[in-house]
Amino acid sequence: MTDSFASILNRRYRWPKGGDRITQHVAKPTDAYISQEPYERAMFIWRGYFKAGKLLAEECERRPFEINYLVYPMMFNYRHGLEVALKEIVSEYGRHVNVHLSDDKDHNLLELWKAYQQLSEALNPQAGDKADKAVGLVIQDFHSLDKGAVAFRYSTNKNGANFKLANGVVTVATLKEVMEGCEHYFEGADDYYCAMVQNGPGPGDY
C-alpha cells in the first residue's frame, strides 16, 4: 500500500539542529552500554549482529513493502555476525592449539571457516556432526553471495563494477530460522571452548 498524498504532506521530517551529537554523558537504564573489556565487547558485537539481522527480518515480515530497503542491512548483519563470530572464537581459543587467523585480515568466510574447523578438530575431535555441516553450507552460501563483505553495503565495487546478485534470492522467514540456528551454534561453541580451556588439560596436552 502506498502513502496517500495527505499523509506524505503531513509526514514528520526531523531536520538537523544545533547541539546535535551522538554521545552524551548520561546514565539512564535505557542508555546503550559500551563495554571497555575486549572479550565482553567482542561477544556483544558478534551476537549483536545476529540479533540485528533477526530484528530486521521480523520487520520485513511485519512490513513486507519495506523489504527492498531492509534486505541489504539484514543480509549484511547476518553475514557480519558469521564473520565476527568465527574471528573472535578462533582468536580467543585458537592460541591454545596453535591455530591462528591469517595475517591478511580480510573478510573471506571460507578461510575463516577452515581455521575454525582446525580449532574444532583440535579441541573437539568428535566434531563434524550434522550441525557443523549445516553451518558450513550456510557459510558457503554467504561467501558465494558476497565474497568481500561489500555487496550488501555498496551498489558497486571499488572499481565501479556491479555486483552479480540473483533476484529473489532470500526467503526471509527461512533465513531468520536458519540464522538463529547459526547464532545458537556459535554461542554453544563459545561456551564449550571456554569451559574446555578453563577446566581441561594444559594447552600442550590437546
Image (cartoon, rainbow, N blue to C red):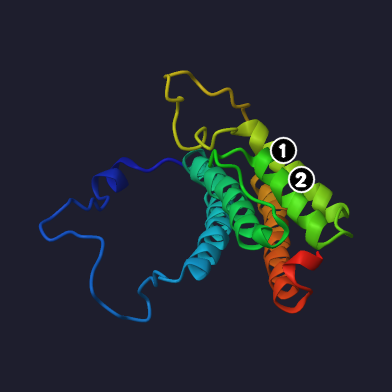
Q: Position of residue 203 (x, y in %)?
A: 73, 67
Task: Return the residue nearer the eye: 173 or 11.
Answer: 173
Quickly name the residue at label 2: 136
Helix, strand, or loop for circle 1?
helix
- Residue 28 to residue 191: above or below: below
Q: Residue at x 70, y 71 (%)?
A: 191
- 99 left or right, relative to 126: left
User: Residue 186: percent from the left, percent from the top?
Assistant: 69, 60
Camera-side residue of 89 and 46: 89
Q: Can the viewer see residue 144 in this picture? A: yes
Residue denoted by label 1: 140
Residue occupying the point 55% across, 58% down? 46
Q: Residue at x 50, y 38 (%)?
A: 68
Give yes or no for contact between labels 1 and 2 (Cβ–Cβ under 8 Å).
Answer: yes
Q: How many numbered circles does the render carry? A: 2
Residue shown at the point (17%, 52%) measured from the top left:
16
Q: Nearer the viewer, residue 105 or 113?
A: 105
Give the residue at the far left of this rendering.
Answer: 18
Q: CA distance from mark 1 to mark 2?
A: 6 Å
Q: Residues within 10 Å of mark 2 (few under 14, many from 20)?
A: some
Quadrant where the C terminus sits is: bottom right
Percent across and percent down for residue 100 are: 64, 50
> Measured along the vertical axis of the image, is residue 157 above or below residue 139?
above
Q: Please name the amino acid that badge 1 sits on.
A: Gln
Circle 1 residues within 10 Å: few <14, some 14–19, many ≥20: some
Q: Of 165 and 191, which appears nearest the observer?
A: 191
Which secondary structure lies at badge 2?
helix
Asked if one can make out residue 171 in the rendered structure from this viewpoint, the answer is: no
> What amino acid type should be assigned to the residue bearing mark 2?
Gly
